[in-house]
Image (cartoon, coloured by chain):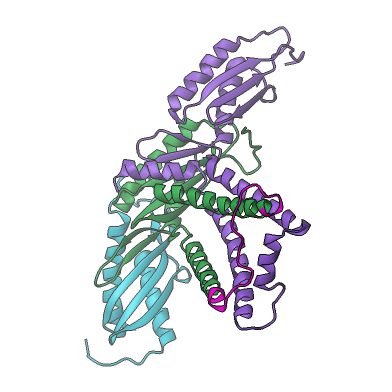
Chain colours: A cyan, B purple, C green
Amino acid sequence: MVAGRVAITQRALERTVMAIAAGHLRVPVKAVRVSLADDSGLLAVAVTAPVRTAPLRSPGRGDGMVTVVQGARGGIRDDITTITGRTVSRVSITVSRAEVVEEKRVK
Amino acid sequence: MSEPKLYRRLVRRSLHRSRSAAIIAALVGVILVAAYVGTEATLAALGRGPLLVTPDAVLASVENPEQLVLVVAAAAALVGLSLIVLALVPGRRGRHHVASDRLAVVVDDAVLAGAIGRVVRREAAVAESRVRTVVGARRATVSVTPTSGLPLNADALTASATRYLDALELSPAVRANVSVSASGVVGS
Amino acid sequence: MTRTNRLFNRIFLALIGLVLIAGAAWIANRAYPVLAIPALPGQLSTNLLWIIVAASAAVIVLSVAWIATRGRGRQNTVLYVGGEDGTVSIDARVASDLITEDLSAVNDVSSVSASAFRVGREPVLEVRVNTRRGADLRTVITSVSGSIDELDAVLEKRIPVVLHVRGSSSAARLTK
């Protein structure tokens, strides 16, 4: 990795963060809303988006929603820093809807 | 707050009106009156002319009430009386509480009536239009119109409805009473 | 609304009513004297007028303040996990989406909606279920209870839930 500064407009940064968040939450980019703010020199990120999840009674559910979203938070934060070079102070996620989808297991 | 206590509070809130709406309506009236009184008093204190009536004139008209003032007073008394009635009447919201482990369950009386009606209809083997159910705070009254030639046993139907209600563990408890009308309908 | 709020509301309402009746009685007494009550001053001194102005202002301020305290804290966040490096909030809509899908096979249920409100600091989920005519209550309640048990696992937390079972919007109200 070469250290350096990347000049990005606010709008472009927002779109980048939206794409990153959409990837981690596995939802369409257009469903994601992002708001960026300065937090004592660092970048504070707020994401509002649906989350893709299995139906309530699915067998083998795996992790609960909070755990999954917490994991996404970490991934989003790392990706933002990696891709844009900005240091993130906090990533807050508000899950607005649930996209309930049957997970079809591929054998 | 412990969950049972919280649930009791939530159920109570769902079953009865809080009277907040009535108070807000009353307070709006109070605000308007206070605003007018304050305005007239300010004008009088500043030695200016009144908006409508001077405070002194108001006092005079109260001391020697004319027709108009008496009418207004009577109206005020009626409003006051209705407020007191609202304060005393329980204000049921047409719902009942059903016992359940995990949830605080509140059911509209219309739904309860439909469920009881269905139980009675099944057992009486008549069409839905022949059963009318009314659910009040503590009583469910079911009227069934039988088919001519196929008599029904009101006691047995009442027992079935009662069993159904008891299983629900309603609060306030509801007693069922099924009556079969004396005249029936020929076709089924 | 707390129990004390409700009692207070009713006492408050009764008091306003009594004040109105007392005022009306006073005026009636002046017209048809029954009790000997001293007359009101014929003229109001400037001091007294300003006191009245102050009192009116106080009444208005207190009334507006009371009205402003209404509003049941409809926050719509059913779960909130705070933190130094960011927070996670889950909206009530998520619960209704999950429960709606879970109950889609239950015929008696026609629609599901959910919202959250605060009691103290705790969020409470309110689930409203619209049912078809003649729905079996036990089935509906058991189904929703099952959905909520699963939701508890998804949210990794047991949230207090109020279930309100309603009829369809066109159902006639059969209440006394």
Find residue A34 and report its horizontal and vertical position in percent. 41, 75
Find residue C7 and report its horizontal and vertical position in percent. 44, 47
Is residue B185 shown to the viewer in this render? yes
Find residue A39 and report its horizontal and vertical position in percent. 30, 83
Residue at the image position 39 percent from the left and 39 percent from the top: C145
Q: Is residue B68 above or below residue B142?
A: below
Could you say which quadrant of the image residue A49 lies in?
Answer: bottom left
Observer-nearest of C139 and B166 = B166
What stretch of residues is rendered in magenta? C30-50
Q: Is residue B171 above or below residue B47?
A: above
Q: Main secondary structure of the magenta part?
A: loop
The answer to whether B9 appears left or right of C56 in the picture is left
Residue C38 magenta-drawn? yes
Quarter the C terminus of chain C occupies = top right
Is residue A57 shown to the viewer in this render? no
Could you say which quadrant of the image residue B137 lies in?
Answer: top right
Q: Is residue B30 above or below residue B151?
A: below
